[in-house]
Image (cartoon, rainbow, N blue to C red):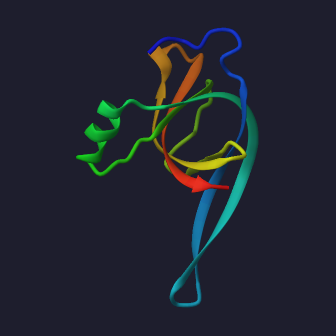
């Protein structure tokens, strides 16, 4: 993977940490904290990556590039105004601490 070029981080996203907690005996409620806005590049993954990940039961549907950010994990969700994504894997692009790549699963419409 290459670094994004000038102008490719052109989509506004909201990153937030999701915490689930029990309600009564059978329900779960969610609380979102640490919401922050970032510029991002969002691309669907190719079919080889999608079907390769299907065998490991970790569905990755998109990749999201953002400026380097420490502390993103699987409890984070991304909202681009149209869809919500759950983070599945996080990597520092080329180990340079310039960009973070999020491999995410699209959960559906906002």
- Please say if 60 is above or below 26: above
Among the 4 quarters of the image, the one containing residue 32: bottom right
Q: Position of residue 109 (x, y in %)?
A: 63, 55
Q: Position of residue 85 (x, y in %)?
A: 56, 48
Specify the farthest residue to the bottom: 25
Quarter of the image with the N terminus is top left
Q: Position of residue 69 (x, y in %)?
A: 62, 30
Q: Position of residue 63 (x, y in %)?
A: 50, 32
Along the viewing direction, whichever of 95 and 58 lies nearer the viewer: 58
**Residue pictured at 71% horizontal, 55% vertical:** 33
Left or right, residue 7 beside residue 109: right
**Residue pictured at 57% horizontal, 55% vertical:** 108
Specify the farthest residue to the left: 55
**Residue pictured at 66% horizontal, 28% vertical:** 40
- Please say if 4 is above or below 101: above
Specify the farthest residue to the front: 47
């Amino acid at each position: 993977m290459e670094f994004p070029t000038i102008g490719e981080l052109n989509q506004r996203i909201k990153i937030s940490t999701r915490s689930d907690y029990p309600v009564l005996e059978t329900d779960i409620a969610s609380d979102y904290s640490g919401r922050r806005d970032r510029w991002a590049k969002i691309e669907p993954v190719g079919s080889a990556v999608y079907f390769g990940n299907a065998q490991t039961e970790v569905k990755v549907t998109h990749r999201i590039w953002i400026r380097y950010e420490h502390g993103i994990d699987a409890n984070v969700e991304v909202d681009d105004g149209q869809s919500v994504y759950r983070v599945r894997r996080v990597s520092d692009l080329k180990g340079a601490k310039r960009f973070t790549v999020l491999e995410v699963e699209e959960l559906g419409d906002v």
